[in-house]
Amino acid sequence: MSFTNHIKLPWRTSWEVSGELRETLFWPCQSPPARAILLMIPGNPGLADFYIDFCTSIHTEFNSLDIICVSHLGHTRFSDNRGLVYRNQKTHSLDEQVENMVCVFDKVCEEYEGKKVFLCAHSVGCYFAQQICEQREERVQRVFSLFPAIESIGLTPRGRQLWLMFQPGVRHTVAAVVDMIRWIFPIRVIHKMANLSQNLNADNSHLVVDKMLHGSCVNSVLSMAADEIRKIGTLNEDFYKQWGHKFVMYYGRNDNWVPIECFKKMKRVNTGGKVVLCENNISHAFVTSQSEEMALVMTEMLKDELHCELG
């Protein structure tokens, strides 16, 4: 039996793309060589670790599918390939994040030349996928957009509630408070406080504390959110009329980031693709507690597109 069979998935590495170091998770296919690749693009916060259960559940259903998930730049602290903690102190704009994600996609296409490349994106990650498809439409096989936050984010119920936190003075204060908390309290106390959260399970609360609850990371997350509100405006209807056939889009029924009106509009605009309304009461933030449920839905959608050819 190969040594790699004893290593628990996903494999974890740091990947330099266009001069930026990215935290990267990799699920190699069970029966090499891979016949297709799924690139998972997170929402915001963009921690790849949030998607481990989701991607692992999908991976077990396909023998010839590689899966890659990358964290957003600056959203997390992670170890580089020498085992040293990498601290990205730069705050990247939304445009810079998208530009580097396009480079990630190019690298994947280069590595998997001639293979099918699928995108799976969550929340504002769907905006990234849209931008990739706009620039590299001939290379994208299919895009699976889950709870797509791709229009007028600042006008949504959650956008209106949180907009103040995203403003420069406020977000810098929040980041400073986070650093102060880490300086004052032992990490075990911070973990106990995080475990009181009603929105995260124990594993995810520990992830947030260890990897994201740092002033620079918090500032990067909030800064990108501010950019999203400022730059993601009206729906690009012309794009979806032309390229909508490449998209499978999954909307929630009670989504405060993507209201039901967005589903109705996309259903009208994107007549060539698949626009689906959730029947399973899965929430926008499915990674916090419903990863397996969402993975079941995603697996079926992927099988429908592949006609089980990767089984």
Image (tube, helix red, strand yellow):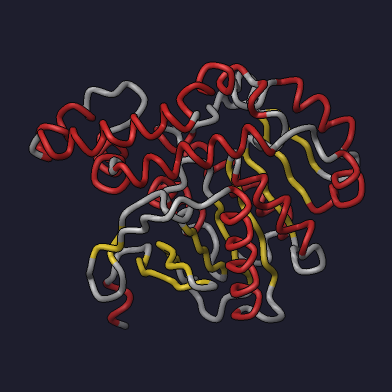
Quadrant assignment, res 266: top right
Query: Residue at 82% of width from left, 67% of height from top?
Result: 138
Q: Where is residue 38? Give x, y as percent.
A: 59, 62
Quadrant assignment, res 8: bottom left
Q: Where is residue 137? Give x, y as percent.
A: 80, 62
Query: Residue at 71% of width from left, 58% of height from top?
Result: 132
Nearest the eye: 14 or 255: 14
Query: Residue at 52% of width from left, 16% of height from top?
Result: 161
Q: Where is residue 83? Give x, y as percent.
A: 23, 70
User: From what the image shows, is residue 168 above or below residue 114?
Assistant: above
Q: Is the N terminus in the top left, top right, bottom left or bottom right quadrant?
A: bottom left
User: From what the image shows, is residue 127 above or below residue 289?
Assistant: below
Q: Where is residue 302? Give x, y as percent.
A: 66, 53
Query: Residue at 91% of width from left, 43% of height from top?
Result: 238
Image side of residue 253 versus residue 284, left or right: right
Nearest the eye: 9 or 296: 9
Nearest the eye: 232 or 123: 232
Image side of residue 135 versus residue 111, left or right: right
Q: Is the C terminus in the top left, top right, bottom left or bottom right quadrant?
A: bottom right
Nearest the eye: 103 or 141: 103
- The residue lying furthest to the front in this view is 169
User: From what the image shows, is residue 100 above or below residue 167?
Assistant: below
Image side of residue 242 versus residue 3, left or right: right
- Picture mark count: 0
Quadrant assignment, res 236: top right
